[in-house]
Image: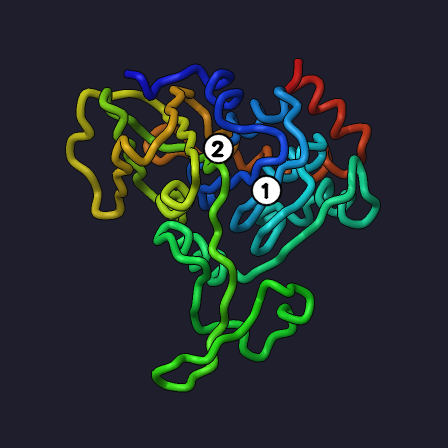
Amino acid sequence: MALFFRLEEAVSDLIHDGDSVAMEGFTHLIPFAAGHEIIRQRLRNLTLIRMTPDLIYDQLIGAGCARKLIFSWGGNPGVGSLHRLRDAVERGWPNPIEIEEHSHAAMANAYAAGASNLPCAVFRGYEGVDLAQLNPNIRTVTCPFTGERLACVPAIRPDVAVIHARRADREGNVLLEGIVGVQKEAVLSAKRSLVTVEEVVDNFGPRSPNAVILPKWTVSAISVVPGGARPSYAHGYYSRDNSFYVKWDEVSKSRESFLEWLRLEVTA
């Protein structure tokens, strides 16, 4: 049970000011509880990495935790903008934030490259688009075998990966099941990893074909946090709270309403 820690202890031990932190989960299993603990511990100058940053990164940015965002598409899914991200980019509140934007394909390949201990990812992409003109980390290489021009981006190798999962067993192995994004690659690419889980079980039992098991040697710490993905969902445990995503658009529109929400719901 050496891998198991209370969430506040795990965040304090694993995440430090100035770290690069990847918090992954695609619609499903987004690690909101861990993100809120980062806010409570007032961590600063983080480089936040995430495919499709949504509400959790809007909250972290608004709380002043971030200095840089590496991402692909940012928004409130099905609702609209991330107002705290926009305020930071456009007006520097609560502090200026640097952004590095990629495509989804680039991010997925960059995580896979990091997990494979490679310096960069090479893939087909970015043809006919202008994003490379804004992001100097999007480059091209020529295949030495075919002469084809291919896109190239740096591997993602965060200091810490944070994910939420359905279950861990008592030895510290972790089960991801349902919609699986790049959580596995994020953990394997990171120096340290924190996994919050719904519960600890003796064994995982029957599993669906769309399941991933992270062996205990890939995980630095596990925290048992039932409901740790809310307002996103955990397949088989609870549904997505769509009403919160709609509500967030109003909560986050002004600095005052955001700070009041932060005081009442996170830091109280």
Question: Residue 174: x percent and y percent?
Answer: 29, 32
Q: Which mark is residue 48?
A: 1
Name, please, the residue furthest toward the bottom: 147
Which numbered disc, 1 or 2, marks the residue closer to the eye?
1
Question: Residue 230: x percent and y percent?
Answer: 49, 29
Crowding near the residue tagged with mark 2, few <14, some 14–19, many ≥20 C-alpha atoms within 10 Å? many
**Residue at (21%, 43%) from the top-left corner?**
208
Circles 1 and 2: CB atoms closer than 8 Å = no
Name, please, the residue furthest toward the right: 91
Q: Quadrant of the C terminus?
A: top right
Relative side of 33 to 181, left or right: right
**Residue at (58%, 79%) from the top-left corner?**
128
Query: Disc 1 to disc 2, how far (Cα)?
Result: 13 Å
Q: Which mark is residue 133?
A: none
Q: Amino acid at mark 1?
A: Leu
* SS label for mark 2: loop
Question: Residue 45: x percent and y percent?
Answer: 67, 35
* SS label for mark 1: strand
Relative side of 236 to 72, left or right: left
**Is 125 located above or below residue 199 in the figure?**
below
Residue 220 picture quarter: top left
Q: In this orientation, does residue 247 appear?
A: no
**Residue at (63%, 55%) from the top-left corner?**
100
Q: Quadrant of the N terminus?
A: top left
Relative side of 206 to 238, left or right: left
Give the number of callouts: 2
Residue topped by disc 2: 31
